[in-house]
Image: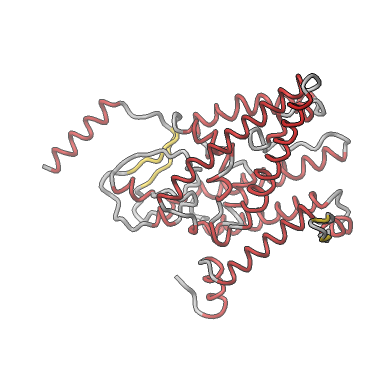
């Protein structure tokens, strides 16, 4: 509901794709463009480096440390807002507190402290395939053995194992910085996600294509490291693919578009359409324990669950059909259950119910309806 006064108009305009929302989007695009390309010359035009002097004034190692500080502050401030907004909901309070802690420590403080002790800058909250270079031989060979083991075992064993038991929410809504920013600073924009069937169709293709490209890029880079000396053309092509993936996926889609489109496209554009980790965990989630349980014959079709689903899932359609469900894209943020006025939805970690039990439930339901 729109509040009265200028402040109410501004809040409504910012969160409902008004002119100020588009201006904010342009501002975010400009911010990231200068962040990535400041100090360079593109098409004969010198791009000013605005952030390195600020970092130096704050005695920070680089503009990327300054960006990490801004990112962490955005999550902390946005997280405080979310905790206050959902202070009655234990799940949201704990989840958001963990997100803030992980970002402040594993994704910011720890990497910075490591460089102070002349160790490689390592982000324990990011794993392959999201942090794709952690599987590149050149990166692996430059890291201490504990970091190598964490990268390999964490990516190949911990990620899928936890995905089976807890779904993708353990990472996408509790650990990952991309999801952390979306669920804190991006909270006012969560309702802007595209709910159309065309968006769902695009999502299913785009995110799995990105995962495929991550797999191919990783495999070719590893292969070129092993045989590149004998096949220089192959090594050159692999290096080109590595650079292209880094620019398109990591810089453009993740770093720029993923955040800049918050005010007009919702907060999970990167997570929903392009993140290779989300794609991998989504596939695991379909066969795991996580699901959303629906209470039979309780839905009043208000549509709040679908409206506030940041992943664009039509939750109401499942509730209307009394259908428990698990969607590969669901990140388990729990807001659908929070906004439901009748408590119809519940996030659960349990194996699928016995088919005979389901049959008996259906028989009983049909009997009572008759």
Closer-to-camera residue (170/269):
269
Q: Indicate the quadrant containing the N terminus: top left, top right, bottom left or bottom right.
A: bottom left
Q: Please tell me in which quadrant of the rendered image residue 6 appears.
A: bottom right
Q: Position of residue 303 (x, y in %)?
A: 36, 56
Q: Position of residue 145 (x, y in %)?
A: 78, 23
- Quick one: which residue is furthest to the front in this view? 233
Q: Position of residue 313 (x, y in %)?
A: 43, 48
Residue at (65, 43) in percent of width and height: 249
Decide if residue 15 is in sight here: yes
Residue at (56, 45) in percent of width and height: 271
- Quick one: which residue is furthest to the bottom in this view? 5
Closer-to-camera residue (234/165):
234
Q: Indicate how the structure is coloured in the image.
A: secondary structure
Closer-to-camera residue (220/344):
220
Q: Position of residue 73 (x, y in %)?
A: 70, 55
Decide if residue 50 is in sight here: no
Determine whether, in the image, residue 16 is placed left or right of residue 26. left
């Amino acid at each position: 509901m729109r509040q009265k006064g200028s402040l109410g108009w501004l809040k409504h305009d910012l969160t409902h794709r008004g002119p100020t929302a588009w201006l904010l989007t342009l501002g975010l695009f400009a911010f990231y463009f200068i962040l990535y390309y400041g100090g360079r010359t593109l098409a004969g035009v010198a791009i000013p480096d605005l952030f390195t002097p600020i970092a130096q004034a704050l005695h920070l190692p680089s503009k990327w440390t300054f960006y990490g500080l801004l990112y962490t502050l955005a999550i902390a401030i946005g997280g405080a807002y979310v905790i206050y907004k959902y202070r009655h909901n234990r799940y949201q309070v704990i989840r958001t507190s963990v997100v803030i802690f992980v970002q402040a420590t594993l994704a910011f403080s720890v990497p910075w402290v490591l460089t102070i002790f002349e160790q490689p800058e390592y982000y324990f909250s990011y794993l392959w395939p999201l942090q794709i270079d952690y599987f590149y031989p050149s990166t692996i060979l430059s890291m201490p053995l504990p970091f190598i083991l964490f990268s390999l075992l964490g990516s190949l064993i911990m990620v899928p194992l936890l995905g089976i038991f807890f779904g993708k929410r353990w990472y996408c809504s509790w650990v990952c910085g991309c999801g952390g920013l979306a669920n804190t600073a991006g909270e006012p924009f969560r309702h802007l996600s595209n709910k159309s069937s065309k968006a769902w169709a695009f999502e299913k293709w785009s995110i799995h294509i990105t995962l495929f490209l991550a797999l191919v890029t990783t495999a070719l880079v590893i292969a070129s490291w092993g045989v590149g000396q004998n096949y220089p053309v192959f090594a050159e092509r692999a290096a080109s693919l590595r650079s292209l993936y880094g620019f398109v996926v990591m810089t453009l889609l993740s770093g720029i578009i993923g955040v800049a489109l918050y005010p007009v496209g919702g907060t999970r554009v990167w997570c929903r359409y392009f993140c290779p980790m989300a794609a991998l965990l989504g596939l695991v989630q379909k066969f795991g324990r996580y699901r959303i349980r629906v209470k039979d014959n309780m839905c009043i079709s208000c549509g709040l669950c679908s409206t506030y689903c940041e992943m664009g899932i039509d939750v109401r359609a499942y509730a209307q059909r009394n259908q428990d469900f698990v969607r590969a894209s669901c990140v388990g943020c729990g807001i659908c259950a929070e906004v439901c006025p009748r408590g119809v939805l519940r996030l659960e970690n349990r194996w699928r119910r016995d088919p005979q039990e389901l049959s008996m439930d259906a028989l009983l339901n049909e009997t009572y309806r008759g």
